[in-house]
Amino acid sequence: MILYGLKTCDTCRKALKSLDKAEFRDVRAEGLPKDLAQAALAQFGPALINRKSTTWRALTDEERGRDPLALLADHPTLMKRPLIDDGGTLYLGWGPDTQAALLG
């Protein structure tokens, strides 16, 4: 299980603490693998982009209209966090549904 997020994100820290077997990857430092980004976008659509973030609010309208994968490549902090890859099954966020699926 791999958890993609930011080391400074409180939600990512909570998820990582609960998922003791998860490997952590910081998207700010390492980026998001292109194939994973494509799969996540196909599964979650626009929800993959965190439109409440300060990074999003700082973008111009022209930048916001760009391809989501290009935006994530340029601004990895725009990704809703955490993105969890559990053997090919993807989960987005750390809400009750994700917690129930992963923690039982």
Image (cartoon, rainbow, N blue to C red):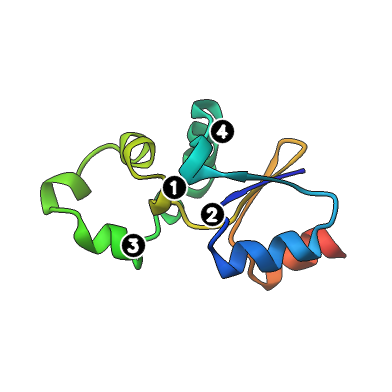
Q: Quadrant of residue 82?
A: bottom right
Which sits earlier in the primary sequence, circle 3 or circle 1?
Answer: 1
Picture coordinates of residue 83 (x, y %)? 59, 50
Query: In the drawing, does residue 65 fall left or right of residue 23?
Result: left
Q: Quadrant of residue 90?
A: top right
- Residue at 53% x, 62% y is 8
Q: Which mark is residue 45?
A: 1
Which sits earlier in the primary sequence, circle 4 or circle 1?
Answer: 4
The amino acid type of the residue labelled 2 equals Leu
User: In terms of depth relative to the viewer, which is nearer, 82 or 6?
Assistant: 6
Picture coordinates of residue 32 (x, y %)? 51, 36
- Residue at 58% x, 61% y is 93
Do labels 4 and 2 touch, CB within 8 Å?
no
Distance of mark 3 from mark 4, alpha carbons? 20 Å
Q: Quadrant of the C terminus?
A: bottom right
Disc 2 residue crowd, few under 14, some 14–19, many 20+, Cα 10 Å: many
- Residue at 77% x, 43% y is 1
Which sits earlier in the primary sequence, circle 3 or circle 4?
Answer: 4
Element on which disc 1 rests: helix
Element on which disc 2 rests: loop
Which residue carries the number 2 mark?
6
Which residue carries the number 3 mark?
51
Which sits earlier in the primary sequence, circle 1 or circle 2?
Answer: 2
Query: In the drawing, does residue 2 fall left or right of residue 5?
Result: right
Which residue carries the number 4 mark?
36
Distance of mark 4 from mark 2, alpha carbons? 16 Å
Disc 1 residue crowd, few under 14, some 14–19, many 20+, Cα 10 Å: few
Query: In the drawing, does residue 32 fall left or right of residue 3?
Result: left
Q: Which mark is residue 99?
A: none
